[in-house]
Image (cartoon, rainbow, N blue to C red):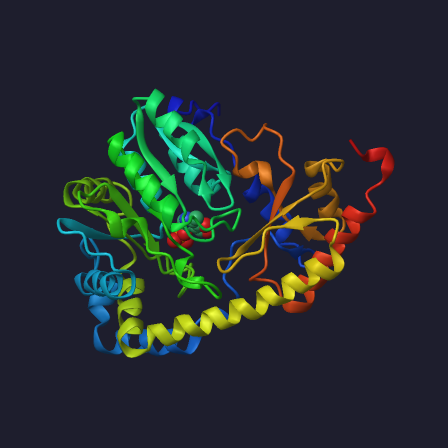
Amino acid sequence: MDYRFSDRVKKLKPSAIREIFKYASDPDVISLSAGNPAPDAFPVDAIRKCSEELLREQPIDALQYSVTEGLPALRDDVSTFLKQHCGIATPGDSILITSGAQQIMDLLGKSVINEGDTVVCEEPSFVGALNSFRSYNAVLKGVPMQDDGMDLKKLEGILKSDSKVKFIYTIPNFQNPTGITTSWEKRQGIYALAKKYDTLILEDNPYGDLRFAGERIPSIKTLDTDGRVIYSGTFSKTISPGMRVGFAVGGNALIQKMVVCKQGSDVHTNIWSQHVIHRFLHGWNFEEHLKNLQKIYAKKYAVAEKALNETAQSLTYRPIQGGLFIWCTLPDSIPMMEYCKKAIQNKVCVVPGNAFLTDSSKPCQSFRINYSSPADADLARGISILGRQAKEWPADQQR
Ligand SMILES: Cc1ncc(COP(=O)(O)O)c(C=O)c1O
């Protein structure tokens, strides 16, 4: 049959990452391409106990339909955690429990983007979010990343010249894919510009709790006085991505609109998962659990860092203090896409950097690696293969 797709989705293509995942699932390939938490980071025993107790004590609550806004007890937990742990408490804000943070991108897009509206994002940025905004026919305008976050002059240039900007999308902690953390000065700058040009900010923070070095920087949401910042959080990287539980915090009227949009999408977030997470947050010490995760990631990152320093000197990489990704850059003489394809032949899978650009046909010399999911020996071996491949890149295939 000749399917007649809507204008809205006709131009959407499967992301380069999904295509690369085909190779990543080959057991002979060392996958440095996923964004998966480390296997040791899952609190399996605790989740098993919470599930057993839940099914014993509240079986029908766990299996019945529930409310779109999310389990009230879990919304209270999120509110308390954000107040105590992150200093986030904007009067007039509401909380919506979502099916992962990914759904926040979709619901915000559905709620505010008209065809042809602009979303300003970091360049490069998280491809899952970019694809959500694209599905509402938003025009994506990228602001180049500097070592401490977006180039604020360029950001202001866009905001000044474009009256159709609906929101600024930023990942201030250990950004996906570059690992960059936005400085406190720049967070204040982004908020001030959003206020000056009267636009929203979507602050996406899946990695803030995975900081294993350096000082925590307050969230942009702590500056918010008028519901301008919609904060996106998730339990995907701290408890389990498979459980699909995220949370949006934003102005009540905006959250109410997202609730209506969510009703048409999945009615509510998996209620079994919400109950289990609520029980986990109460029956187990979440702060201790986060400290344990930070130790796991510090140890794993040390393996990656050693391998990069000792076996991959032909690559440059940006050191990180948390999160899951390392951004590596090739010498100008090596064509990045050919390099990533050759890596697959050599049984290592990475994500080509252009997948994260607003326009993936633009030149890019970088690629993303994930250090959290492979076993230590595979991680070190994968990085050394990448290093050797760059060092021994054939002269006749250089640019
Ligand atoms: C920056 C960023 N935002 C959001 C998400 C989506 O997370 P979730 O699993 O909560 O949908 C990811 C997942 O990798 C991410 O990297």
Question: Could you tell me residue 53's position as x and y percent?
Answer: 28, 78
Residue 382 lies in quadrant? bottom right
* 270 relative to 90 in the view: left or right: right
Residue 243 lies in quadrant? bottom left
Q: Is residue 382 visible?
A: no
Q: Residue at x 42, y 73 (%)?
A: 291
* 286 relative to 12 in the view: left or right: left
* 173 relative to 83 in the view: left or right: right
Quick check: 114 above or below 109? above
Question: Could you tell me residue 329's position as x and y percent?
Answer: 65, 44
Q: Residue at x 26, y 78 (%)?
A: 56
**In front of the other: 372 or 143:** 143
Q: Residue reaching furthest left?
A: 92
**In front of the other: 133 or 157:** 157
Q: Residue at x 37, y 57 (%)?
A: 217
Quick check: 24 above or below 71? above
Residue 330 lies in quadrant? top right
Q: Is residue 285 visible?
A: yes
In the rendered image, the quadrant that contains the C terminus is top right
Question: Could you tell me residue 145's position as x and y percent?
Answer: 49, 39
Question: Could you tell me residue 333's position as x and y percent?
Answer: 76, 35
